[in-house]
Amino acid sequence: MAMPKQKDYYELLGVSRDASAEEIRKAYLKLAHKYHPDKTGGDKAAEEKLKEINQAYDTLKNSDKRAKYDQFGHMGDQFGGAGGPGGFGGFGFGGGAGGFEAPFDDFFDVLFGQSRGGRGRRAAARPGNDLEYRLTVSLREAAMGTKRTFKFARREVCGDCKGTGAQAGTQPQSCADCSGTGQIRRAQGFFSISQTCPRCRGTGRIIQKPCTRCSGSGRYRAERELSVDLPAGIDTGSRLRLSGEGEPGEIGGPRGDLYIFVEVETDEIFEREGNDIICEMPISFPQAILGDKVRVPTLTGEADLKIPPGTQSGTLFRLRGMGIKDLRGYHKGDQIVRVQVETPTKLSREQRELIERFQEISNEKSYPLYHRFIEKVKKSLGG
């Protein structure tokens, strides 16, 4: 019976053959986290995938093994290219005959958040959760930049128990089930996997007398007020990171971060398009015919705009440098004014007579666009 074809190690990790050692390491850690039994609930297909990923990384992380693999492919295993008996070694995942070599140095450091070691290893510090806050600003605030003060809720370390969760005068005890590591090792086939301790829920500690203020959690919910400077040019979807303003960590871990997501309100006058702003302004029938100088609104006040005689509805005028500043500070956008000629709907008797007289004395020169269009229509119809 034909042997199943072995998968290419680079394809298994999803990297190119010229990938750097760091790129290979990051790819492995991402996949190992995805297919780890703690995440997959012991799924057999995931276990097989994890075996393949570990074997691929064990080879490619070592420059000598990688060179042999690049030259000989999987045949390099016979020359000690991928661990196993007679290979370059590693740590047996599960130990004993029949196990496979797993790169535990990286595996434990990232997946379990703890360094290698034997029994008695303490539960690792864990950073606090990141938080999100959505901040709504006006278009003018986004264009000019502003300082905003806002309030949000987050968990704080309990002052009564100093975050231990235990009543004053008492201390949490080391969990007997996991020896304070927060993890329990279980054999599953030829795997030996680490799972979160169900008794202490990964903390490595048991609280006999919980703090009455925080009910043993070591945390309580509180409101915090912060001020943030929003740079000029910020737009909907922009994200600001306030380091260390998230929730407190566990077992001495650092605080998480606070991410502010900005949303710019719709403006009644202006529409943003990149760093340009568009303003649609109505002008009268006589202004469009005779021309005029009008005042148009801007982000900072008003500006003069010259309307030339014979201006058509929909004509665009550009006010240079009166738009929104680029977020990186390279340049400033423009303001575009789109004029709309307003046709009168209610005419007095005198106005109607004047318009009718105007129509009587008009000719092709009065409406060149209309007459050119009529000529095109006649030509297309063969007239």
Image (cartoon, rainbow, N blue to C red):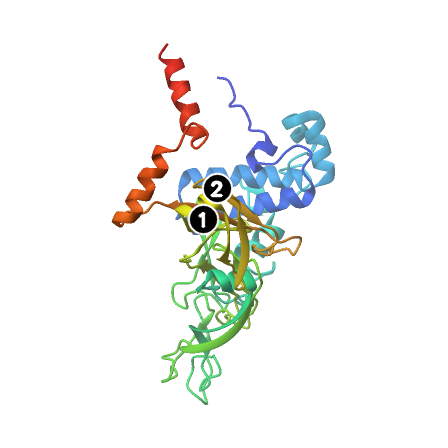
Horizontal and vertical percent for residue 287? Answer: 45, 48
Give the numbered dot on residue 311.
2
Horizontal and vertical percent for residue 36? Answer: 48, 48
Placement of 32 over or under 142, stated as above or below: above
Earlier sequence position, callout 2 versus callout 1:
1
Q: Which residue position is annotated with label 1?
A: 287
Q: Residue at x 48, y 17 (%)?
A: 1
Name which quarter of the figure residue 241 lies in.
bottom right
Using the image as rendered, state which of residue 97 and residue 165 is in the foreground.
Answer: 165
- Kind of residue indicated by mark 1: Gln
Horizontal and vertical percent for residue 157? Answer: 47, 78
Q: Is residue 267 left or right of residue 95?
A: left
Label 2 SS: loop
Split into 4 quadrants, where in the image is the C terminus? top left
Label 1 SS: helix
Disc 2/disc 1 C-alpha distance (Å)? 8 Å
Q: Residue at x 69, y 43 (%)?
A: 21
Of all residues, the one furthest to the top in this rendering is 382
In this view of the protein, can residue 120 be seen by the observer? no
- Kind of residue indicated by mark 2: Thr
